[in-house]
Amino acid sequence: MREPVKTGGQLTRHCHCPRCGNPNPSVRLKRDKIDKMARSPIRLLHRLLGGTLYHCAYCRLQFYDVRKRKEMEKPQGKVAGGESAMPSGD
Ligand SMILES: [Zn+2]
C-alpha cells in the first residue's frame, strides 16, 4: 500500500523557498546558527533523504530539499574554497 507523499502543494520539479517561493535559493554546505531553519515533517524527510541544504536570501530561511534548483540542471564548475564570502564572527 503506497501512501502519497504530501509536499504541501509544492509539486514542482525544482526546489524553491517554502516560505516566499524564491526559485533560486543558494546552496549551503552547513547550517547557519543565526538564520532560521524550516521545520516541518516534509523538510525532515528531505533531510533524511539526503537533500541539499538551501538558504533563501530573501527571508533568510534554511531548508533541505532533495530537488535541485532550476539553475543547477546545467553543469557547473566546482565551487572553489567551499566557504561563503559572508563575514562571520567566528
Ligand atoms: Zn524565502
Image (cartoon, rainbow, N blue to C red):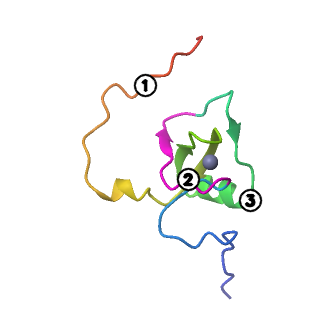
Q: Which three-letter amino acid code belongs to the residue tagged 3? A: Pro
Q: CA distance from mark 1 to mark 3?
A: 29 Å
Q: Amino acid at mark 2?
A: Asn
Q: Residue at x 34, y 25 (%)?
A: 81
**Residue 21 counted in the magenta span:** yes
Instruction: Note whether 4 is above or below 58 in the view shown.
Output: below
Mark 2 residue's CB less than 8 Å from ligand 1: yes
> Would you say the beta carbon of the disc 3 residue lies within 8 angstroms of ligand 1?
no
- The label on residue 41 is 3
In magenta, the rendered stretch is: 19-30
Q: Secondary structure at mark 2?
A: loop
Identify whether 64 is placed above or below 70: above
Q: Residue at x 44, y 56 (%)?
A: 69
Q: Main secondary structure of the magenta part?
A: loop
Give the mark nearer the N terminus: 1 vs 3. Answer: 3
Judging by the rendered image, the residue that carries numbered circle 2 is 22
- Give percent across and percent down for residue 56: 57, 43
Does 25 sit left or right of 83 as displayed?
Answer: right
Location of the N terminus (image quadrant): bottom right
Q: Earlier in the sequence, mark 3 or mark 2?
A: 2
Residue 83 circle label: 1
Q: Residues within 10 Å of mark 1 (few under 14, many from 20)?
A: few
Quadrant of the drawing holding the C terminus: top right
Tell me what residue is drawn at x 60 percent, y 41 percent: 58
Q: Amino acid at mark 1?
A: Glu
